[in-house]
Image (cartoon, rainbow, N blue to C red):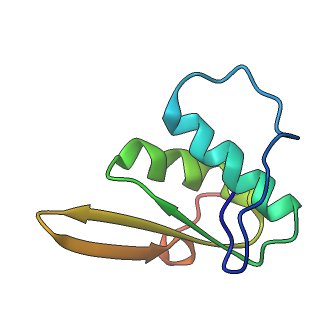
Amino acid sequence: MVTRFAVLSALDIISNQEEADTKFVLHACAAANSGAKVTVVCSPDTDVLLLLLHHWPTINKEVYFLTAKGGKYTIQSLDTFPSTY
């Protein structure tokens, strides 16, 4: 995991996940559990955004989704999406 101040080992994350999309969410949850106050997930894939939205109540921290298309970057707080819970 990369933080503002350090690169942390993620060896304590045990998973049989092979799909990168689900690993993003797994690492976001681990970062939150390790004390991260803000998590930024970078991916061009909207599947990752949907997975983050689904697991956001579990993460329970400030989470941003960063994506890029055609050289234009967009960062979106998950707080801005309507909650269906």
Q: Is residue 84 left or right of residue 36?
A: left
- Give residue 36's position: percent from left, percent from top: 79, 72
**Count of number-bearing discs:** 0
Which residue is located at x 50 percent, y 37 percent?
21
Which residue is located at x 65 percent, y 64 percent?
2
Which residue is located at x 27 percent, y 74 percent?
73
Which quadrant of the figure has residue 76?
Answer: bottom left
- Give residue 59's position: percent from left, percent from top: 75, 59
Q: Is residue 21 above or below residue 8?
A: above
Q: Which residue is farthest left?
A: 70
Front one among 60 and 6 = 6
Front one among 30 and 80 = 30
- Give residue 75's position: percent from left, percent from top: 39, 75
Q: Is residue 28 above or below residue 7?
A: above
- Give residue 50's position: percent from left, percent from top: 48, 48
Q: Is residue 46 left or right of residue 27?
A: left
Q: Is residue 36 above or below residue 32?
A: below
Which quadrant of the figure has residue 71?
Answer: bottom left
For the N terminus, the quadrant is bottom right
Which residue is located at x 47 percent, y 46 percent?
48
Decide if residue 58 is in sight here: no
For the C terminus, the quadrant is bottom right
Which quadrant of the figure has residue 13?
Answer: top right
Q: Is residue 44 left or right of residue 4?
A: left
Decide if residue 35 is in sight here: yes
